Image (cartoon, rainbow, N blue to C red):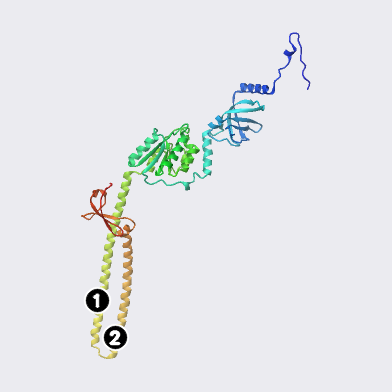
């Protein structure tokens, strides 16, 4: 291509008429400045391509493409650190950035200032991504979840010490069963640092207080942003690693957090968690009274069956004695008739008849005795099943106040220093009351 000739005029020097000549770096910087000044911030929509993850510096480089073209995207560490979801190959996203040129390579690119998924919000995308990941690892499997103790005496709570949640929990526990030990680990429940404090609280209580029987982890209600600490992976893994059963009680009725899926039990609110973990003292008392009433009825039934057995044994004895008396009477009658029959043949015949009669009597008596024995054995088996001694063999005991020998039904019937007698399955004990608990 021929070089354009320079035009000369009377009032311009040759140097003034020459075109400006750029160095490569000068030209790239000039184009970069022009691009950034002309376009400013722009929104671009496309599909992630050539995604290789963040570099060691934390910066991320990938392409954004549609069906006809693609463009290089640079997301620096600050932008990547603020993302709630994870970038991945093929994901449709929206990028807010500025058009620029990388001067050293002369490469056109867009520097991202903000990235969000197309369609679903960033938080929802992050929630679904983490949920899918942890579910694949088995952290939501019902088989790994443990039962919550029926009546725990030592409860740990990880929450804000000034929030509404701790007030609700303590109020419910105090109302339902006041004499419970409670250990509170104070933690932020929203904002920067919240996820780390919640996870550290769970780990600390496991390490320092392994005697705790259950942990309550949660907070009161709020927006999805307020509750987001309970959707963080660090919190989910701390719950999964806990040796102490965990109840998630984030204050929301409908939506679930990741913590809810991982925990051994999910409660819709902190108050509901307190009601689940602490039984009502009055309800327990009523339940025990019902058990006592049923036991009392069972003992009464046993006594009635013992009386019935005594009656049957008496009837059997009377029947046996009556039968023996009749047979003895027959035998005496035959003996008296025999005295009047002197011929030996007649005597032998009657002797044989008498022997046969005796045999039949013995067979009949033996049969009847076996029958009565089976009846007695059946009643004895039922008596054994219902006997208070069978109850004692399972570890129960009966106590009497001395010297009155009055059965004790309540600790309020004795005082310190009183003597009592205790019947066990094998043997009895006499003891003095040192202390009573009502």
Q: Quadrant of residue 165?
A: top left
Q: Residue furthest bottom?
A: 343
Q: Could you say where residue 225 lies in the image, as x and y percent from the top left?
A: 48, 32
Is residue 112 among the parts visible in the rendering? yes
What residue lies at 50% left-to-right and 38% top-to-bottom?
Answer: 233
Q: Residues within 10 Å of mark 2 (few under 14, many from 20)?
A: some
Q: Residue furthest front?
A: 208
**Relative to 73, does residue 386 appear above or below in the rendering?**
below
- Mark 1, residue position: 325
Give the position of the N terminus as an image quadrant: top right
Q: Could you say where residue 136 lies in the image, as x and y percent from the top left?
A: 53, 44
**Relative to 80, does residue 284 appear above or below in the rendering?**
below
* Foreground residue among 420 and 245: 420
Q: CA distance from mark 2 to mark 1?
A: 21 Å
**Relative to 372, does residue 89 appear above or below in the rendering?**
above
- Mark 2, residue position: 351
What SS does tag 1 mark? helix
* Foreground residue among 106 and 231: 106
Q: Is residue 17 left or right of residue 212?
A: right
Query: What numbered label is drawn on residue 267?
Result: none
Q: Quadrant of residue 247?
A: top left
């Amino acid at each position: 291509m021929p070089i354009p000739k320079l035009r000369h005029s009377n009032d311009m020097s040759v140097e003034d008429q020459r075109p400006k000549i750029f160095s490569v770096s000068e030209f790239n910087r000039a184009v970069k400045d022009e691009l950034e000044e002309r376009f400013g911030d722009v929104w671009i929509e496309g599909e992630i391509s050539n995604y290789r993850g963040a570099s060691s510096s934390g910066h991320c480089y990938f392409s954004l493409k549609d069906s006809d073209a693609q463009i290089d995207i640079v997301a620096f560490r600050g932008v990547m650190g603020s993302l709630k979801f994870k970038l991945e190959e093929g994901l449709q996203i929206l990028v807010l950035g500025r058009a620029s040129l990388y001067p050293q390579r002369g490469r056109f690119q867009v520097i991202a200032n903000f990235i969000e998924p197309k369609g679903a919000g960033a938080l929802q995308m992050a929630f679904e991504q983490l949920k899918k990941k942890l579910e694949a690892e088995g952290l939501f499997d019902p088989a790994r979840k443990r039962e919550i103790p029926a009546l725990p005496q030592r409860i740990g709570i990880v929450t804000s010490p000034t929030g509404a949640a701790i007030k609700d929990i303590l109020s419910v526990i105090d109302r339902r069963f006041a004499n419970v030990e409670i250990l509170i680990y104070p933690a932020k429940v929203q904002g920067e640092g919240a996820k780390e404090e919640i996870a550290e609280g769970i780990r600390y209580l496991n390490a320092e207080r392994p005697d705790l029987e259950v942990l309550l982890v949660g907070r009161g209600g709020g927006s999805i942003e307020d509750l987001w600490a309970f959707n963080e992976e660090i919190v989910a893994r701390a719950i999964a690693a806990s040796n102490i059963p965990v109840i998630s009680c984030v204050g929301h009725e409908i939506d679930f957090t990741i913590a809810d899926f991982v925990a051994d039990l999910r409660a819709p609110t902190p108050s509901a968690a307190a009601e689940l973990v602490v039984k009502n003292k009055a309800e327990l008392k009523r339940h025990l009274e019902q058990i006592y009433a049923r036991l009392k009825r069972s003992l009464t039934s046993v006594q009635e069956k013992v009386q019935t057995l005594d009656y049957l044994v008496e009837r059997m004895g009377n029947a046996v004695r009556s039968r023996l008396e009749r047979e003895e009477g027959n035998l005496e009658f035959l003996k008296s008739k025999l005295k009047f029959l002197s011929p030996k043949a007649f005597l032998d015949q009657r002797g044989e008849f008498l022997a046969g009669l005796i045999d039949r009597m013995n067979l009949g008596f033996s049969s009847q005795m076996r029958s009565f024995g089976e009846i007695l054995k059946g009643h004895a088996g039922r008596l054994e099943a219902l006997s208070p001694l069978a109850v004692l063999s399972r570890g129960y005991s009966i106590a009497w106040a001395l010297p009155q020998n009055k059965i004790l039904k309540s600790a309020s019937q004795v005082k310190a220093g009183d003597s009592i007698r205790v019947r066990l399955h094998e043997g009895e004990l006499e003891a003095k009351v040192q202390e009573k608990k009502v």
